Image (tube, rainbow, N blue to C red):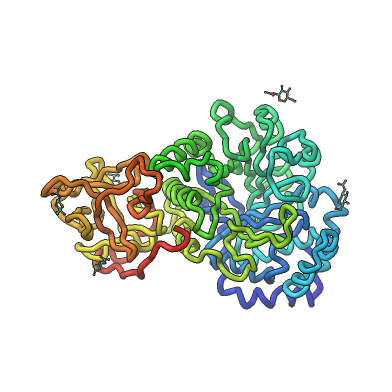
Amino acid sequence: MASSSPLLLLLLLLPLAAAAAAAAASLPPLPLSTASRWVVGADGRRVKLACANWASHLEPVAAEGLSRRGLGDIAARVAAMGFNCVRLTWPTYLATNATLANLPLRASLERLGMPESVAGVRVNNPGLLDLPLIDVFQEVVSALAKNNIMVILDNQMTTPGWCCSENDGNGFFGDKYFGPEEWLKGLSAMATMFRNTKNVVGMSLRNELRGSKNVSLWFRYMQLGAEVVHAANPGVLVILSGLNFDNTLDFLVPNQIQLTFTGKLVFEQHWYGFSDDGNWGSRNQNDACGMVVDFIKKKGLFILQQGWPLFFSEFGFDMSGTHVADNRYLTCFLTVAAEMDLDWAIWALQGSYYIREGTLAYDESYGLLSWDWCTARNPSFIKRINALQSPFQGPGLPNSHQPYNVIFHPLSGLCVLVKSSEALELGPCDKSNAWNYTKGYELILKQTGQCLQAKSVGENAKLGTSCSKSSSKWKLLSNSGMHVSTELTNNGTRVCLDASPDGNITTNQCKCLTVDPDCNPESQWFKIILSSKHIPGGTSILQLPSHGPWSPTSSS
Ligand SMILES: *[C@@H]1O[C@H](CO)[C@@H](O)[C@H](O)[C@H]1NC(C)=O
Ligand SMILES: *[C@@H]1O[C@H](CO)[C@@H](O)[C@H](O)[C@H]1NC(C)=O
Ligand SMILES: *[C@@H]1O[C@H](CO)[C@@H](O)[C@H](O)[C@H]1NC(C)=O
Ligand SMILES: *[C@@H]1O[C@H](CO)[C@@H](O)[C@H](O)[C@H]1NC(C)=O
Ligand SMILES: *[C@@H]1O[C@H](CO)[C@@H](O)[C@H](O)[C@H]1NC(C)=O
């Protein structure tokens, strides 16, 4: 912990007090550990990592945004957006180069020729301006702690600067700036520094290994790194990146990692739309999603079956909503995240950088926050991700039930709820009824035994009691498997479940099942997933409240 003068403390606390109401309810019982594929708290209950990446590894070696908003306000904002964790990035030199670590933030910004950033920090975080960079880093962790936000420290680079390229000398063990000795020293120093800091729950040992695909070196050094971190700080999860920019862990299929300790190992994988070979722009959306998900399963998701947690520690998209390929990728990603109930970290919190790749005040189009850090760049996305910020499954969920099905609609981030037997609608997944998607293709409401039925083209879907009718048998069509489809009883017309912009659940002609690369099927995309969350009180299907409309907005 950095030592602070009383005045500094006061300055830091003022904005915090105002924001306190927004803080996450509480930290889970710590430390975290693993139970097969789940991350769990000290009480054995699942803790789902719903994180935002916050960069602190670029040339200034300070968390981005301190020239734009008060640190306490930023931390409170993270909590208010529903995240319970931050993946905070750092360069090795922050931990191994004392000259750098002791450089005051002001001097770090001045040496890069950024007087405006200095002025911004003076206004928004005056107490931080003359602190050494390492103390600023600790203050960021501390501000997150005050908002009950967990922190995962991510070793992003050795040298401060934007990550990652094949030839930046930071890609793989033995590269120009990536000497294993220095790396291990840095990991150990960082792990030690935060040994008594409860909210530091994990360490990503190195971001996006790339370049060399030398698997034996991966094993040698990742095992060493994991041991060094664990020896210095046995409380933290050790999180290991795959190869090829963390796009693949497939080399773990024949090999097992050997560690002297158990219950702390997590793997991480990254998945961005731009890594998917242009498929999102050029293919039918069902075909693209089906194909890419198969690929992701082979490259990483198999880890879950092996009984390890897999943290999707970077995913992200252009928040403007105008990037068609990114929008398509995002909906597919959200579906997988719901189905597998993944732990994840979005890239990124920061709306802009002090400087990135030579550009001052660089705008982060993937940022949750706007360029000035004052508002959400895409408020509808914050709502859309909400259902994925709490667990559907896992050990010891409060009031946990026999698993049941929910019908998730990734375009809205909502689930299919029963309003009355004549009307279903989209609403919060927390309030979902308990469905059972049976071997006989019926979608049965567990409390009442009624089942989902199609009436006709363009009308609301409804509940019925004669579940053996053809219009009550729902098959999953297309290569995405996300069109939930049935045949009308009177004339055999095939229809698909659909959500109207005001959230009514209807049945319509199935759209874009294959071939057409331009057509957008997302209103008809549903994923039937498992949940064992608490079912809301009052099991009568007619007592469920009605919810406001959702509408596809700029993000969709
Ligand atoms: C340590 O950091 C300082 C300040 O950035 C830099 O001038 C110096 O070259 C670094 N030393 C090493 C050994 O990298
Ligand atoms: C991996 O690196 C080691 C040590 O440099 C070397 O002996 C080995 O041949 C390399 N393996 C491959 C497959 O390149
Ligand atoms: C659905 O019902 C079947 C038969 O009663 C049961 O075996 C299965 O576990 C149920 N599945 C879910 C998800 O509720
Ligand atoms: C089948 O019946 C539905 C009404 O239930 C109607 O909307 C649709 O046009 C009919 N299709 C054919 C091919 O007759
Ligand atoms: C949605 O359903 C309600 C009945 O629950 C109906 O009044 C309303 O007109 C429907 N909206 C659309 C667009 O069909």
Total numbered circles: 0
Q: Position of residue 281 (x, y in %)?
A: 47, 45
Report if residue 228 is visible in the image.
yes
Q: In this rendering, would 426 be left or right of 320? A: left
Q: Residue at x 79, y 61 (%)?
A: 135
Q: In this rendering, would 403 be left or right of 69? A: left
The image quarter containing residue 171 is: top right
Closer to the camera in the image, 195 or 338: 338
Q: Position of residue 90 (x, y in %)?
A: 72, 52
The image quarter containing residue 475 is: top left
Closer to the camera in the image, 535 or 212: 212
Report if residue 400 is visible in the image.
no
The quarter of the image holding the N terminus is: bottom right
Q: Residue at x 33, y 50 (%)?
A: 405
Q: Residue at x 66, y 70 (%)?
A: 72
The image quarter containing residue 399 is: bottom left
Q: Residue at x 27, y 52 (%)?
A: 497
Q: Position of residue 9 (x, y in %)?
A: 75, 74
In the displayed structure, 414 sits above or below 439; it is below
Closer to the camera in the image, 198 or 67: 67
Q: In this rendering, would 273 be left or right of 229? A: left
Closer to the camera in the image, 51 or 40: 51
Q: Position of residue 352 (x, y in %)?
A: 66, 61
The quarter of the image holding the C terminus is: bottom left
